[in-house]
Amino acid sequence: MSPIVKIPFLISQKEEDTSMTKQISVTKIFKFEMAHQLGSCYSSECLQIHGHSYKLEVTFAGPLNKDGMVMDFKELKEIVQPIVDRLDHSFLTTENYGCNPTAENMAKKIFGEIREKSPLILCIRLYETDTCFVDVHY
């Protein structure tokens, strides 16, 4: 049996100073299933009703609070989950969404809704497929 070795902290007190930190962010991933029908599109397939397994990455950034967090993941979930719940297993059209329900328009609206609830939102990434996504940054 090998002895327990204590490893000293590798970060000095000076390095922990937040003035040296460029940016701290936290990200949570959400998943939902949704169908849509695009109102106008270059592809006839996309004009048909079809669905995707979406993945939404939401990133918040800011200074560390007194607890050493940018934002508690529970608080992050409380902000984003209602949006995801509303989209999950829904069917979006131009008529019921107010615009063509493209991944770009969806990401823009999602970002705006989150921004209304927290100024710490930095960016979102909405995957429509495993290899296709949209980024919206503040």
Image (cartoon, grey):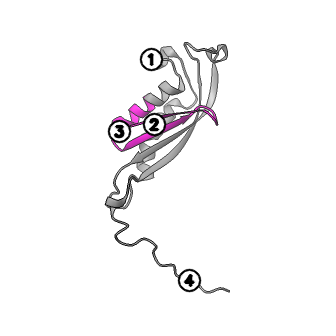
**Residue marked by disc 3:** 117
Does 127 appear in magenta? yes
**Residue marked by disc 1:** 98
Q: CA distance from mark 1 to mark 3?
A: 21 Å
The residue under the point 48% across, 30% down is 107
Q: Quadrant of the C terminus?
A: top left
Q: Amino acid at mark 3?
A: Lys
**Residue marked by disc 4:** 5
Is disc 1 placed on a helix, strand or loop? loop
Task: Sort mark 3 into few (<14), some (14-19) or many (20+) by Cα contacts within 10 Å.
Answer: few
Instruction: Point out residue 124 in the picture as x, y percentages from the top left corner.
Output: 47, 38
Q: Amino acid at mark 1?
A: Gly
Q: Which residues are magenta?
A: 109-138
**Residue marked by disc 2:** 82
Q: Quadrant of the N terminus?
A: bottom right
Q: CA distance from mark 1 to mark 2?
A: 19 Å
Q: Nearer the viewer, mark 3 or mark 2?
A: 3
Is disc 4 placed on a helix, strand or loop? loop
Q: Nearer the viewer, residue 89 or 117?
A: 117
Task: Sort mark 1 into few (<14), some (14-19) or many (20+) by Cα contacts within 10 Å.
Answer: few
The residue under the point 45% across, 75% down is 9
